[in-house]
Image (cartoon, grey):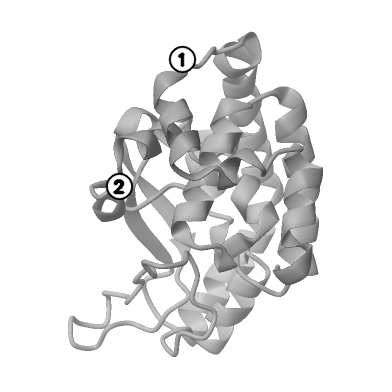
Amino acid sequence: MGEQGEPMAREAHGLGARAEGGEETRRLYLAKPRRIGRYERWVKPVLDRIAGIVLSIVTAPVVAVIALLIRTKMGAPVLFRQRRVGLHGREFVVYKFRTMAPDRRRGPSRPVEVERRVTHKSEHDPRHTPLGRVLRRWSLDELPQLWNVAKGEMSLVGPRPELPEIVARYEPWQHRRHEVKPGLTGLWQVSARGDKPMHEATELDIEYVENLSFLTDLKILLATPRAAFGSHKGA
């Protein structure tokens, strides 16, 4: 999101300073017990399930059109499935629309969807098809993740669901981000999206976990359209 990234993070969460605290901040994350409030324990899971089901129904026509376009222009498969790490370190399958060309060396049904290891996004990856670039630009490739929300595997707001091989290299303090469900959007997405280095994105995720509240979620949700449509970068 460029220059407006950090102001948006502060607007969405009123945080950010502690995320730059380095080793001192990381030790604090490990030593400080986290209090789980009523909103996180009871209200948020119910709201997520309801929102996931309702939004899946509302967006069904758009999902159907996108699926048809992918099948027509890119062939099968329409969906990209990948294992990610969720609540308490449990793995689950995340769903996205396929945005990359199939890997012909592995057969036409195996898409090449390789995450970058430095930042979370690669906007100029030659493997992205023209349709895929459009879907990523407007974050439409992530619409199927509403199914993950409806199933209770994800939340509307939370840390980014990460790859198991990346989590395997985590330091102990970084696992605190797994104390809540991963989210469709989150603090790092509305602050700098894919441009922020991965270690800084993890710190923002943990800042969210440490300060989770209804007001925080609401502010992040309200900031998400501006982040998705205001910067022409994938979520």
Taking 92 as reference, is 142 above or below it? below
SS label for mark 2: helix
Expressed as whole percent of the image width and height from the top left, the position of residue 16 reads: 67, 44
Which residue is at 27% across, 49% downward? 164
The numbered mark, 2 or 1, whose residue comes first in the sequence reads 1
Residue labelled with disc 2: 167
Label 2 crowd bin: few (<14), some (14–19), many (20+), radius 10 Å:
some
160, 119: nearer the viewer: 119
Taking 65 as reference, is 200 above or below it? above
156, 5: nearer the viewer: 5
Expressed as whole percent of the image width and height from the top left, the position of residue 33 reads: 46, 15
Tell me if residue 159 can be seen: no
SS label for mark 1: loop
Which residue is at 38% across, 39% downward? 174
For the C terminus, the image quarter is bottom right
Residue labelled with disc 1: 33
Taking 142 as reference, is 104 above or below it? below
Which residue is at 47% across, 83% downward? 128
Query: In the visual, does 128 lie left or right of 65?
Result: left
Expressed as whole percent of the image width and height from the top left, the position of residue 170 reads: 30, 45
Residue 64 falls in image quadrant? bottom right
